[in-house]
Image (cartoon, rainbow, N blue to C red):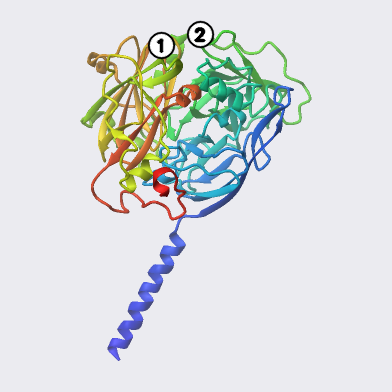
Amino acid sequence: MRRAIFLHFLLGTVACLIASVVRAEDPYKYETWTVTYGQIAPLGVKQKGILINGQFPGPTLNVVTNDNVLITVINKLDDPLLITWNGVKQRKSSWQDGVLGTNCPIPPNSQWTYKMQMKDQIGTFTYFPSTLMHRAAGGFGGLNILARSVIPVPYPKPFEQFTLLVSDWWKTDNKVLKQRLDQGNSFPFPDALLINGRPNSFKFTGMKGYTYLFRVSNVGLTTSINIRIQGHTLKLVEVEGAHTMQEVYESLDIHVGQSMAFLVTLHANPKDYYIVASTRFTKPILTATAILHYQGSNTPASKPLPIGPTYHVHWSMKQARTIRWNLTANAARPNPQGAFHYGTVPVTRTLVLANSAGKINGKRRYAINKVSYINPDTPLKIADFYNIPGVFQLNKIKDNPPPGPIVLGTSVFNFSLHDFTEIVFQNNEKTIQSYHFDGYDFWAVGYGPGQWNPTMRRKYNLVDATSRCTIQVYPNSWSTILVSLDNKGMWNLRSAIWPRRYLGQETYFRVWNTEHSLYTEYDIPPNAILCGKAKH
């Protein structure tokens, strides 16, 4: 009898535990996106654009920290397609990253479901096609990870949030642009800037006396931009998932691939005001406008437009140094961001990565440390998982810039899980660079002119440099990041300037340990598409 009672008690306890686990499981969000070509005319000229569920730009994806997000992508294009989630860390699951080093592309007239968790993240991010030159035709959108209701944010709740996407734009078809690059020709200067797919007519409506959160991303291919709002200031509160010190700016530079969020309080006389985006470091300067509309007002916006910086490299570098981590604020978790003292962690390895341009077989290529990356038929991650030889070569790329001409190669850096790494990006060219690192955020600890050398470490911010996932490198200058490689997998480090990335300015990090455990990395998903040598 006692055994029966104990058994009933035990089974009841187990049932309660299972029920609590089920109730405690993080929420699921399901999306189905059909990707098609469709006619658009953002500059008044009809052209072929890439639409998601008929929309250009694509739908804004709003999710919450730790949400499980399942997005079925139906590819109706005539090319294989992948979508990458710029800034989503994909914890333990580079299988979902949506780049050619981790995934076989989705063939035309087929579909694939991304299964992602927004684990321990908040912030402003984007998504876009990572294949070929598709993103020159659209397919991009905003991706916002909101804080859980139980986690406070370090500013009063805004009345509403707006997503604002700035992109450079070409009237030329994306396949023509791709062909131009394939033939070794230079990439053309953009025809215009767009804000949310329009050059001058998008409207954001608010009420006097209320504060709004603007989530702004540069989803362009080549061009840094400056953003400002006529008659209003911008209080910066977040950069790519990190809460920042709440400095107030007249205008902010946002480089290719970067995102940030700022608060705007509608305190002015009720009327319309211009929101202005203009190109940085270009001749000529391109400008796009949108409208901040005070509800109930019939007074149109009036010129002149607020003036922004043009070339002014030092101005931009100086501003970049003012963007600092809010040490006492939490991010996705309740503990303060500053609880991790990144500046006291010993560096296990230093990379100095120099971008360069050159020609191979008479055609233009771009490289990192003289290796111009080429994609193999088999994704690196799949080849690594199945131990398929001959797909990539570890450490073909060197830790420091070597002498000699650039060469083609499938380059992969090999790192141990939890290595703490210093990466110096050295830019010896006359144009600005921008780099994005999948799977991680990092601390942007230093910017400086000229050639980096070890004495430059004295200039690093080792206390409150903001973390982010995309960093600019100014012309003939260097930028340094510190990164904790705590996310096992195969991760893409790439130029965010898309023609350069397409022509080889990227590499991969294999972050590894010998333990096969779901605590450190998930196995290949059962729905994974196989291609190349993995298909045989």
Classify mark 1: helix, strand or loop: loop
- Disc 2 marks which residue? 311
Q: Depth check: 322 or 155 in front? A: 322
Residue 416 % position (x, y): 24, 39
- Residue located 25% across and 16% down the image: 458
Picture quarter with the N terminus: bottom left
- Disc 1 marks which residue? 429
Q: Residues within 10 Å of mark 2 (few under 14, many from 20)?
A: some
Q: Residues within 10 Å of mark 1 (few under 14, many from 20)?
A: some
Q: Depth check: 323 or 233 in front? A: 323
Sooner in the amino-acid sequence: mark 1 or mark 2: 2
Q: Label 2 is placed on what type of residue?
A: Tyr
- Give the image quarter of residue 447: top left
- Give the image quarter of residue 337: top left
Query: Mark 1 and mark 2: span between their CA atoms?
Result: 15 Å
Residue 476 % position (x, y): 38, 10
Q: Label 1 is placed on what type of residue?
A: Glu
